Amino acid sequence: MKTAETKIQNKRLEPLGKRVMKYRALIVMILPALLFFAVFCYVPMYGVVLAFKDYSISKGIMGSDWVGLYYFNRLFSSDRFWEVLGNTLVISLLKLVIGFFPPILFALLLNEIRTKWFKKLTQTASYLPYFISWIVMAGIIREMFSANGVINQIVTAFGGEAQIWLSKKEYFRTILVSTDIWKGFGWGSIIYISALSGIDPQLYEAASLDGAGRIKKMLYITLPCLVPVITINLILSMGGVLNAGFDQIFNLVNPSVKSVADIIDTYVYELGIQKRDYSLSTAVGLFKSVIALIMVLGTNFAAKKINGEEFTLW
């Protein structure tokens, strides 16, 4: 233990220039990702000040008049905002609660397939919808749920009545959640499949010697080994609790269902792009970011209290 600790301390005491030269290949590889986040995530944070100013294009950001919390007061006194916030929470929580488990279940089932070619084929087929943009996917979904689409054909074949499903408020959220799960569960299972490949095979061999079957191995070996990954994924997912899926809803929404489908992101788009109310749209976006930060910190704190530091982000 002392030897290992000494080596770690010696590495930390190495001059910065020497460490940079030693890991220069890795640094070059990570530079594009760092530049991406710097240009598209950190530099635009300067624009957050718009939420506290009466922005005018002619005056610019710095020249616009400071109004403090005026736009936040206007935001929280708006009935439209609370309707949009409610829609966002309902849709995102449905996606989180219902959509969190299919990738785990799929990874567990895929892990039990012993025929290699069939396993690879199934895994590849599950990934494909993820790489289709929501613009194309929306066209496919509209066709499926149209008056003459495959869904209505199945319904009428069993004696039901054909409907325009995407124009029905009572069905629209169900369609949103189910299509979102269909599109993303295969891709979401990758991290769990990777975690499964890291489980020590000797654990399964020992369980076989004790007479454990596949189900018991899954319950007592596989699932406990996945708990750290599941916990971290849950913490990260809570950060997106107000992300109900702008691309999906923007391409599927219609006036008939707008009252149950309008979310914070579409509201920001409406304010900022269509109405050019930049200050109010920035205030909405800042509110969303603050809530996301609180949710991540709170979930991480709760996970640390329940399971210990090894199952948390920090």
Image: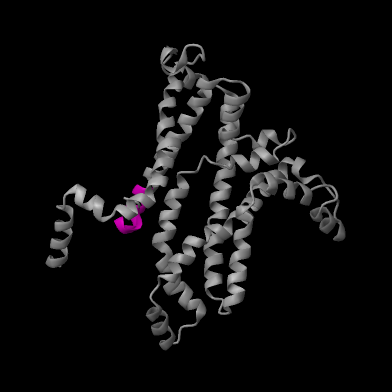
User: Image height check: is 166 above or below 49?
Assistant: below
- Residue 6 shown left or right of residue 261 in the figure: left
Q: Position of residue 147 (x, y in %)?
A: 84, 47
In the image, 303 versus 144, the foreground residue is: 144
> Which residue is rendered at x = 34% and y = 54% of the image?
26
Q: Quadrant of the N terminus?
A: bottom left
Chief SS of the magenta region: helix
Q: Position of residue 30 (x, y in %)?
A: 38, 50
> Which residue is rendered at x = 51% and y = 79% of the image?
214
Q: How is the image coloured?
A: one colour
> Which residue is rendered at x = 40% and y = 27% of the image?
46
**Tally of numbered discs:** 0
In the image, 138 versus 222, the foreground residue is: 138
Residue 305 visible? The answer is no
Residue 3 visible? The answer is yes
> Which residue is rendered at x = 60% and y = 65% of the image?
124
In the image, 193 versus 135, the foreground residue is: 135
User: Image height check: is 291 above or below 16?
Assistant: above
- Residue 161 shown left or right of residue 97 in the figure: right
- Residue 161 shown left or right of residue 292 in the figure: right
> Is 311 included in the stretch rendered in magenta?
yes
Q: Position of residue 196 (x, y in %)?
A: 45, 69
User: Image height check: is 287 above or below 6?
Assistant: above
In the image, 27 versus 184, the foreground residue is: 27
Magenta-highlighted residues: 300-312
User: Image height check: is 226 above or below 21?
Assistant: below
- Residue 21 shown left or right of residue 129 in the figure: left
Q: Position of residue 88 (x, y in %)?
A: 57, 38
Using the rendered view, name the quadrant where residue 198 is placed. Answer: bottom left
> Is 30 included in the stretch rendered in magenta?
no
